[in-house]
Image (cartoon, coloured by chain):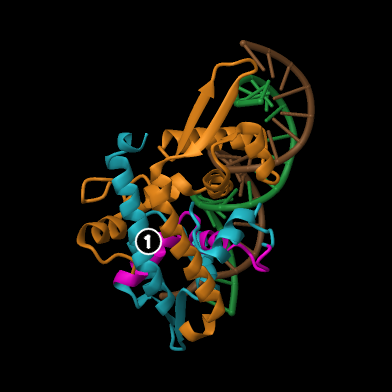
Chain colours: A cyan, B orange, C brown, D green
DNA sequence: CGGTATCCCACATGATACTG
DNA sequence: CAGTATCATGTGGGATACCG
């Protein structure tokens, strides 16, 4: 495929599972990417944050239809730990917390757009490929 | 983010779950893409096929460390149904089957490379974003 | 207001055996 | 050789209650 550059080719081709260490000496970056943005809610959260952020926790929850506290909270924590989301807490009473995206998400956006376009194009002329 | 074009922006922003129908009239293409390439083994299978294909079932299984018949078989079926994998059967005895990728995967490759590069860059200068 | 703590379950994945 | 059938299991995610 998938991979044309030397380093990425080696890493993606020879990573046999998501925990493997590649010959290039690091974890397959594509696996890493999928872990960061994977799961049921993370892309929706990023979209909502990018469009409506900075936004408070409960307002964000309203924007995302069907999400539970468990998932919103844990997803935000992971995204923050991975550097995609910034959490700002104002120590007033009652406490006020605002979430927003970091610059990393600005870089991610165009890539995800291409991915979405790829899926659209594919389903449109699927037979052409076969 | 994530989305800058009008249609994709609407669809991604307002898709509240992976089964929702967007105001644009179709399912969010990004969700579709994630369903197609998601799961534990599909990207590894595509990588192996792209590099070593056309390749026979059991040879492919050897290339992918730890995969079971159940998962390889079911993943290949889904990938074929989605138009990413071609299955060619030779009716000799014993039967010979060869798997390869379609042109859709050629288009997907560069996008995934960017995604991998994004993850590498991010982890390299994570602090710069925060 | 902005979460955690528990408990629970469906489903994705795994193990093993078997077959056209 | 290229799978399928069957049963087992682990985990991602959901429901509900509660807390600083």
Q: Is A64 one of the magenta-colored residues?
A: no
**Splitting the image into 4 quarters, where does residue C10 fall?**
top right
Give the x, y percent position of residue A95: 45, 82
**Image-based side of A22 in relation to B22, left or right:** right
User: Is residue A102 visible from the viewing direction of this image?
Assistant: no
Majority secondary structure of magenta residues: helix
Determine if the magenta segment contains residue A37. Answer: yes
Residue D14 x %, y %: 49, 49
Q: Which residues are magenta?
A: A23-51
Which residue is denoted by mark 1 in the rendering?
A112
Q: At numbered mark 1, what does the secondary structure look like: helix, strand or loop?
A: helix
**Which residue: 70% across, 44% down?**
B66
Question: Quadrant where the N terminus of chain B lies?
Answer: bottom left
Pick the front one: C6 or A130: A130
Q: Position of residue B76 (x, y in %)?
A: 53, 35
Say above or below: A104 vs B31.
below
Answer with left or right where residue B43 lies relative to residue B68: left
């Amino acid at each position: 495929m998938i991979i044309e550059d030397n380093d990425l080719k080696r890493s993606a081709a020879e990573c046999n599972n998501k925990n493997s260490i590649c010959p290039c000496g690091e974890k397959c970056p594509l696996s890493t990417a999928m872990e960061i943005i994977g799961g049921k809610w993370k892309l929706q959260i990023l979209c909502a944050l990018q469009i409506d952020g900075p936004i408070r926790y409960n307002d964000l929850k309203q924007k995302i239809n069907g999400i539970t506290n468990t998932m919103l909270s844990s997803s935000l924590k992971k995204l923050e730990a991975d550097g995609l989301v910034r959490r700002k807490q104002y120590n007033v009473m009652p406490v006020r917390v605002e979430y927003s995206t970091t610059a990393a998400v600005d870089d991610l956006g165009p890539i995800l757009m291409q991915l979405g376009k790829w899926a659209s194009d594919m389903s449109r002329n699927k037979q052409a490929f076969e």
